[in-house]
Image: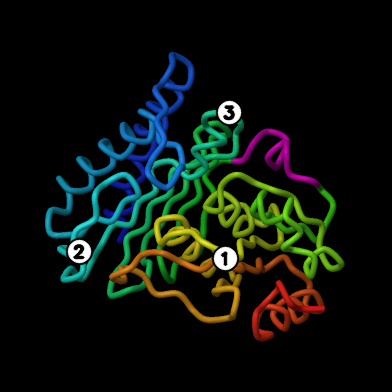
Amino acid sequence: MEQELATLSDAMIRAGRETLRLAAEGFETHTKQDQSPVTSADLAVNQILRESLSAAFPDDGWLSEETPDTSDRLSKKRVWIVDPIDGTRSFVRGLPEFCLSVALVENGFPTVAAIFNPSTGEFFSAIRGHGMHVDHRPEAGQPPFISSERPLALVNPWELRAGRLQALEPHLRCRPIGSIAYALALVAAGEADVAVTLDGGNEWDIAAGVLLIEESGGHATTPSGHPFSFNRIDPRLQGIVALGSTLSEPARARLMQLSTAGAGFRSAT
């Protein structure tokens, strides 16, 4: 899988440069049918990644947030699952909380993954069975918006504002973040301890992050405690709970208990 990761890394770095160029020179923003934003940068990244990966691996399938989905991918053994820019709202606002996120999924499980934040230069990658790597860290040792107060959970901003994470707050400091993919990468890298979103999302939001979490010694499940599989007919999800290897055993045990308790964090006391 080293060739796959090398090809992916080269394409993501080139796409990241294009993202920063558009951020500096200007980009167009539109609203999709689900009311989420999409920019010309999302589409440019999607094109760079698809052209590079399809040229190198023409027999693989493709699932991307910014490409119309077809059933062709369901018959493929290997499928690239892509979020060209996860955290588009953050990108539009000029916040360094967005990333490019790509996973190669084989028979339902991610085998190669990379998450790249062009704003900070952090590049997180993993090959199944070979651990997780971070090729760059900010000079201060951690992203400037990440607190040193631990244990720390990176959470969905809307869910935090709506009070849907009250069961977590006695156990963790909750910090909102605009990209679940970037949150998963930061937890895998040990910069935070937990990443949580309780509702919604799609496979492209988390496929790469799940492999990073697992290869760093962490644990990722649905909010009700079930494992993930990818390249399903319906790529929509019902959230994720990721526990990093940095989390203390007592806190890990309590959060696992909350996660698997019936309706999950919402109703736990």
> Residue at horizontal 55%, vertical 41%?
122
Question: Magenta region: which residues?
Answer: 137-147
Disc 1 is placed on an element classified as loop
Q: Are marks 1 and 2 in contact (CB under 8 Å)?
A: no
Q: Quadrant of the N terminus?
A: bottom left
**Residue 152 placement: quadrant:** bottom right
Labelled disc at residue 14: none
Q: Is residue 40 magenta?
A: no
Please determine whether, in this image, residue 67 is positioned above or below residue 262: above
Q: Kindly report the distance in space between the C-alpha atoms of the residues bearing marks 2 and 3.
A: 34 Å
**Residue 170 placement: quadrant:** bottom right
Snapshot colouring: rainbow
Residue under circle 1?
216
Left or right placement of residue 145 versus residue 111 in this view: right
Of tags 2 and 3, the one toward the viewer is 3
x, y percent for residue 6: 32, 48
Please determine whether, in this image, residue 165 is positioned above or below residue 135: below
Labelled disc at residue 93: 3
Which amino acid type is shown beneath numbered disc 2?
Arg
First along the sequence among labels 1 and 2: 2
Q: Main secondary structure of the magenta part?
A: loop
Neighbor class of circle 3 (other Cα within 10 Å; few <14, some 14-19, many 20+) is few
Q: Kindly report the distance in space between the C-alpha atoms of the residues bearing marks 3 and 1.
A: 31 Å
First along the sequence among labels 2 and 3: 2
Disc 3 is placed on an element classified as helix
Residue under circle 2?
73
